[in-house]
Image (tube, rainbow, N blue to C red):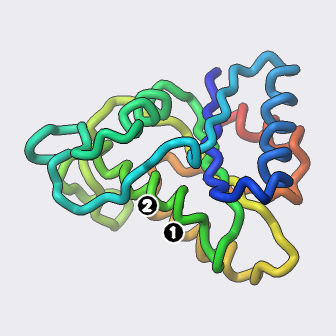
Amino acid sequence: MKVLVLNGNPKQDYPEFDLYLEQLKNFCDEKDIAVELILLREFDLHNCIGCYSCWLKTPGICFHRDGMELLIKKYLAADIVILASPIIMGFVSSLLKCFNDRLILLGHPFLYLKNDRMAHVPRYAHYPQTVLFLDDPKYAESDCFSLIESVYQRSSREFKKMFTTKNNIQEIIDEITHY
């Protein structure tokens, strides 16, 4: 099983979140679960500009050449992807949001009806299970978690569950490895 952890913490001065993810990775290493932890802040990711080149001109390939190609390959090769972010202004970080927006190239521009909602026809046969992992700061409003979970349930392929730093690492790994 391959697990990819994408750390959307934009702040180097917030090491507690990074440390928690390192502990999660170390726990997986001890359990012989292949884990790769990537800091998204080490990439100069550009925002999606809505040019639709990834659909029309170069299907499946973004106009920007900023490292997203490598991230997409790792994303598609994983069995489970953990999208991790601190809560910033009531939502995931802009860095993780930028990554999510750029995933538009994983689908075709064509739509079909899925669970009473329109969805893009998948470009690939396999997509990883997606888990959202959020920091649980004391000041975060409790309803922001339900909003974030709702957004990811509707927009992410193969979304399974949301966890926070209040969850026990062993319980998280036990649960996600059984998907």
Where is residue 92 drawn, in percent x and y? Answer: 60, 66
Measured in 3D between alpha carbons, the distance from the residue under mark 1 to the one under mark 2, in whole angstroms, is 6 Å
Residue that mark 1 sits on: 151
Residue at 84% in and 45% down: 19
The relative height of residue 46 versus residue 107 in the rendered view (above or below) is below
Instruction: Determine if residue 154 is in view.
Output: yes
- Kindly identify which numbered label has been placed on residue 4: none
Q: Is residue 53 left or right of residue 48?
A: left
What is the quadrant of the C terminus in the image?
top right
Q: Residues within 10 Å of mark 2 (few under 14, many from 20)?
A: few
Where is residue 85 drawn, in percent x and y? Answer: 66, 57
Q: Is residue 116 left or right of residue 154?
A: left
The relative height of residue 14 versus residue 66 in the rendered view (above or below) is below
Q: Residues within 10 Å of mark 1 (few under 14, many from 20)?
A: few
Q: Secondary structure at mark 2?
A: helix
Residue that mark 2 sits on: 155
The relative height of residue 179 versus residue 160 in the rendered view (above or below) is above
Tag 1: amino acid: Val
Contact (Cβ within 8 Å) of mark 1 with mark 2: yes
Residue that lies at the very extreme toward the top in this rendered image: 32
Residue at 62% in and 36% down: 38
What is the quadrant of the N terminus in the image?
top right
Quadrant of res 155: bottom left
Q: Secondary structure at mark 1?
A: helix
